[in-house]
Image: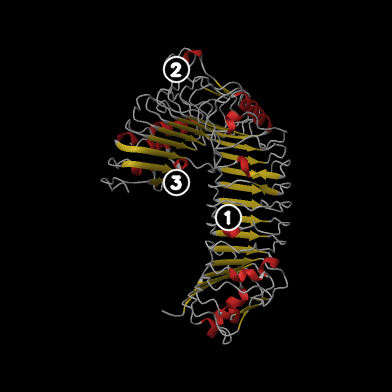
Amino acid sequence: MSKLKILQNLSLFLVGKHGEKGIKELGTLSNLQGSLSIAKLENVINTEISETKIMDKKCLEELWLSWSEDAKDHFTNSQSEMNILCKLQPTKNLKRLDVYGYRGTRFPEWVGDPSYHNLTELYVIGCRYCCILPPLGQLHSLKKLTIRRMSMPETIGHEYGDSFTGTLFPSLECLEFHHMPCWEMWHHSHHSDDSFPVLKSLVINDCPKLKGDLPPHFRMLEAIQIKRCNQLGSSLPKTFSIRKLHIFESNKVALHELPLSLEELRIQGREVTESVFEAIAITPRASLQILDIRDCSSAISFQGDCLLTSLKFLYITDCKNLNFPKQNHQLESLQYLTITRSCDSLTTLPLDILPNLNNLHIYKCENIGCLSTSKILPNLSYIGISNCPRFVSFPEEGLSAPNLKILYITNCTNLKSLPCHINTLLPKLEVMTIDECREMETIPDGGMPRSLRSLCIGNCEKLLRNPSLTLFDMLSHLSISDLFDGVDYFPRKDFALLPPSLTSLELWKMSSLHTLECTELLHLTSLQQLTIGDCPKLENVAGERMPASLINLQIFRCPLLEEQFRRKHPNIWPKISHIKVIQANNNPGAAKGVVLIWMTAY
């Protein structure tokens, strides 16, 4: 490589062991430009490092220096390691620097040298033996700084001493700390009140010993994330510009009032949630649009109309004792509502307080029994209700949602019927899934909306026996899965006739299915796609032949039938040989397995 003196682009150079492909080969490549990554620096021979001449490569803009974290002989000589990094000093034109897995205890002076006036991004990752950060605050153009997996530092911010009076990090916009297990204090001097003047985003994750106050002088801060910092017990910095605040598993962090500029708040844990709800009650003109609450066991309630009127997205997860807003709280702006394993006191969800709701998700709410509304819901486009064993009914007079497109109901074992007047009240319904609703048997009078195109039915035997299913002549796609153990052939004569409008049919997870009856499919004169999956006993195709319109037949994890296809069994192959494409895959990881494809016609 050393002979390629005019080489301009080299994205990655791996340092070889025992002098093979030594780092000195980079020495003559003075025309390198753009980005250069040098990996496996643990293999560097000290006598060669001076020949690298990284400083002479004036056109380099990004440099990534990496030591393998799993390399043997960790930290054999700190001075030797620092000497290597010292000799890898890059050109002053550098815009981005990544130092990964450096094994020295200190950084050389060039890291943080203010003469690097073009440096805008710096990443220090996995430098586990460094006891102190380099003085990075005087990098005048630095916009993004990420410190990750540094095990040794206990204090950050004292690199300059109390005598420093200048502005630290004058251009920094994004600051991130991750996985700093020994970090205990963020030192901030009273002389540095003008530091971080344009910082917009602060992230502190997995710093379990960090305690005390965060620096108070973040005047332009827009986003804060604090995650798994259980000793950090201070109030958050006061700022008038904060828009996003995420606090996860950091229960000592307190929020005594909501910044009026706050638009997105995501919190996890009992103590912080309690403090937030107290702040909600006293905030006069909140702008909050997104509220995400998780893992709070306390009995808490929404209070104060001022906050609720601005909400557009509300996510409630694992808050069993949270009391959902009642009828006198109008959530007029709310568009997305998700309730997961929460609100045990909620038995009826009053949709009248959500006049502009767009998406509704209810998951594993054990006590909710029904939805209620007396009004039209003009914006509602999606309803998903899953794993709610006590859910038994939709509004008695029907659910009037003229723009609802998707209805998804799974594992509601006591629900017996779809919404009344569904054909007229849901005129734009396109996709419906009914899965693990074993008591579901009734199709409302008037049938289904003419707009319905896709229907998925899983483990709903009673519904499949309903003769009204034949009237779903608007359907183009039908998926049937998880039929009970006694179903050994399909379609069964006691099932409703499949809608003749189908262009796509899927059969999944029929553990007892042995035979596919072609004759019962011949009326599907528009059928083009047939997919069968997870039917381990399926091995026979009976009747005349598959519909003449069928173009594509896909078989997944049906080993017996696949073997019949492979052998072109004389009792089966003539019934499918007219199909242009037949695909079979018996690998449990279907997406990664070998697909056998027979092109039978052109």
Report the quarter where the C terminus lies.
bottom left
Q: Amino acid at mark 1?
A: Leu
Helix, strand or loop at label 1? It is: helix
Residue at x 46% of width, y 26% of height: 134
Q: Which residue is mark 1?
A: 425
Residue 281 versus residue 539: which sits nearer the camera?
Answer: 281
Q: Which residue is mark 2?
A: 194
Cβ–Cβ under 8 Å for marks 2 and 1? no
Q: Which residue is mark 3?
A: 18
Q: Amino acid at mark 2?
A: Asp
Q: Is residue 556 visible?
A: no
Q: Which of the numbered marks, if any, corresponds to residue 502? A: none
Q: Position of residue 80 (x, y in %)?
A: 46, 32
Q: Which marked residue is nearer to the observer: mark 1 or mark 3?
A: 1
Residue 189 versus residue 220: which sits nearer the camera?
Answer: 220
Residue 139 versus residue 7: which sits nearer the camera?
Answer: 139
* For residue 58, side relative to residue 504 (left or right): left
